[in-house]
Amino acid sequence: MGDVTQPPMDDETAATGSSTRPSHRRRWIAIGLGVGALVLVGGYAAAVATVSGDVPVGTSVRGVDIGGMSTEEATATLEAELGDEAAAPMPVTAGEASTELVPAESGLAVDWEATASQASGLILRPAKLVAHMRGEVELEPITTTDEAVLASS
């Protein structure tokens, strides 16, 4: 039989027994994964930018639509639409005794600005982001209590 000649090896191939040059397939997989990650991050950043800032479309408080408004506009709208309801006397019953509690006289109030502000701003939680994008956000008013006034009522 004749001599079989092998191609010459460089020093690294001879030392390790394999070529150090990555395969084309691995390179394309890495490039594909990198591009996919960039698309996901870019899409998420675009979604965050879309719903952050002003009150996202589809946001409401007790049935009052404040979506697409600035925080200031939403504050004014909520106070105009829900102010009378929030100021109305509330029936209170303890055992057999009952009375009415007037919020303004009892240290109870709605913070309209905080209520509107809770809907705006930077949204990073994925579930909250998706809910905002679907227009499925119903918020509750944020209330304040003056404990001293309430205790004396």
Image (cartoon, rainbow, N blue to C red):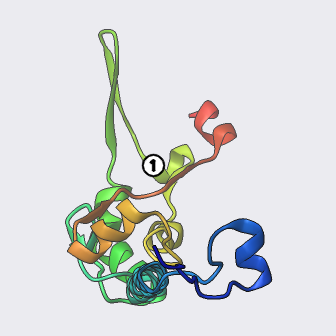
**Label 1: few (<14), some (14–19) or many (≥20) C-alpha neighbours in 10 Å:** some
| Residue at x-position 54% and y-position 79% | 3
User: In the figure, 100 relative to 122: above or below?
Assistant: above
- Between 116 and 87, the residue placed more toward the observer is 116
- What residue sits right under mark 1 in the picture? 103
- Between 144 and 52, the residue placed more toward the observer is 52
**Quick one: quadrant of the N terminus?**
bottom left
Left or right side of 110 for 135? left
- Between 6 and 37, the residue placed more toward the observer is 6
Q: Residue furthest front?
A: 1
Pinpoint residue 16: horizontal percent, then vertical percent.
72, 67
- Between 83 and 29, the residue placed more toward the observer is 29
User: In the figure, 11 relative to 85: above or below?
Assistant: below
| Residue at x-position 46% and y-position 66% | 115
Left or right side of 114 for 128? left
| Residue at x-position 28% and y-position 59% | 85
